[in-house]
Amino acid sequence: MKISRVETITIRHSWGEPHEGVTREWPLVLIHTDGGPTGVGRGGNIDTIEQDLAPLIVGEDPRRIAMLWERMYEAVWRVRGPVMGGMASIGAIDIALWDILGKSCGEPIWRLLGGYRDSVPAYADGIGYVPQSPETVASLVKKHAGLGYKAVKFHLYAHDDEAAVVKVKLSREALGPDLKLMVDAHRTWHGSRAVEMVRRFEPYNLFWIEEPVRQDDEPAYLRMVREATSALVAGGESEGTLYGVRRLITDGGLQVVQTDIIGGGGYTGLMRIAALAEAHHVYVAPHGAQFPEINCHLVAGVPNGLMVSACPDVEPYEIWSKLYNPSFRVVDGQIQMTDRPGLGLDLNEDFIAEYRVEAPIQQSHPGR
């Protein structure tokens, strides 16, 4: 079996309420083989995939995933660096390669990754993407719990510390004492301020506090926060390399690694990170409220998988339930893994045809 072609598709869909007129683009990557299965991946940078990575893998056996991953990893360091879409582009391709591997041997990815559990808990995400009052946040927290989720997270973007405390207080009251409540602070505070804030949150029994500190001295600040709170300290969603995650764990005391499944280099990259985390008694809960159908295989495969993030399909900030036919679903806060090979997903061709962005005419680039 050989890779015959790498195809990229961009979906443009509303982000938020349709009347607001805001859209967001979602790349898909299809890896075709010569007579074998086609693998599906999501995310990445289209230019990086088409210009830098596709030429490295076309003609190769798609089942030699580790070899191809290392080849692409070396290439993004030489060409564009691990940022600028580099690691995410590797991740999109890697996911598609694992999809091919599973389809070729008739096994689901979660089982190939280890098959530790056949059902994965999901937490509701998607609150606070836009400015919202404490009352609105608490109302949405209650709404998401009413959908069957046993854990709910909201986001803090605005630098209003007093409002943040009220949001946590009202959300805990709305959720009750038994369900999990998490807060994503988006690297809002420096170390001493973060310590003050998590102490103010302490009466409300947060399950985790996510990315509470600025990035300029992140490991040292994280260590300060860990020592000040009973909540788990989560983060690392933007850290795509094994070595960066190692620093956050060993120097920062990170307790939940949230490296993005795509930005961390797909299943190949995340399996390495999961093993590193397990060696330090740390959980993995990959970032990505918009791709629980990808994350669930990783969390199902490894012993230290914790939960996956899912923007509920009743919210306007959601895409994953629309991409497949039949729709991928989270039921009562759980994702039931199946025996279907690979990702176990069939693309919704009608939806893709309706929202597909036609590729622009390519212009020549001197020196490229």
Image (spheres, rainbow, N blue to C red):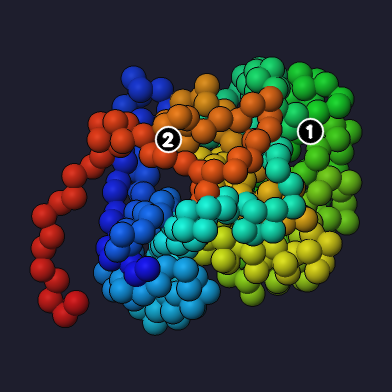
* 252 sits left or right of 360 in the view: right
Q: Residue at x 74, y 47 (%)?
A: 117
The x and y percentages for residue 326 are 45, 29
Q: Which residue is mark 2?
A: 324
Q: Is residue 220 depicted above or below 37 in this figure?
A: below
Between 44 and 295, the residue placed more toward the observer is 295
**Is tag 2's residue or tag 1's residue first in the polypeptide sequence?**
1
Query: Around disc 2, counting alpha carbons within 10 Å, would you say few (fewer than 14), some (14 to 19), or many (20 or more)?
Result: some
Callout 2: helix, strand or loop? loop
Q: Residue at x 65, y 36 (%)?
A: 336
The x and y percentages for residue 59 are 31, 74
Task: Mark yes or no: residue 83 visible.
Answer: no
The x and y percentages for residue 258 are 65, 54
Q: Is residue 269 depicted above or below 156 in this figure?
A: below
* 206 sits left or right of 80 in the view: right
| Kind of residue at disc 2 | Tyr
Task: Tell me the CA gap for discs 2 and 1.
Answer: 29 Å
Q: Which residue is mark 1?
A: 180
Asked which quadrant contains residue 259, the reply is bottom right
The x and y percentages for residue 44 are 40, 57
- Say whether marks 2 and 1 touch (CB < 8 Å): no
Callout 1: helix, strand or loop? strand
| Kind of residue at disc 1 | Lys
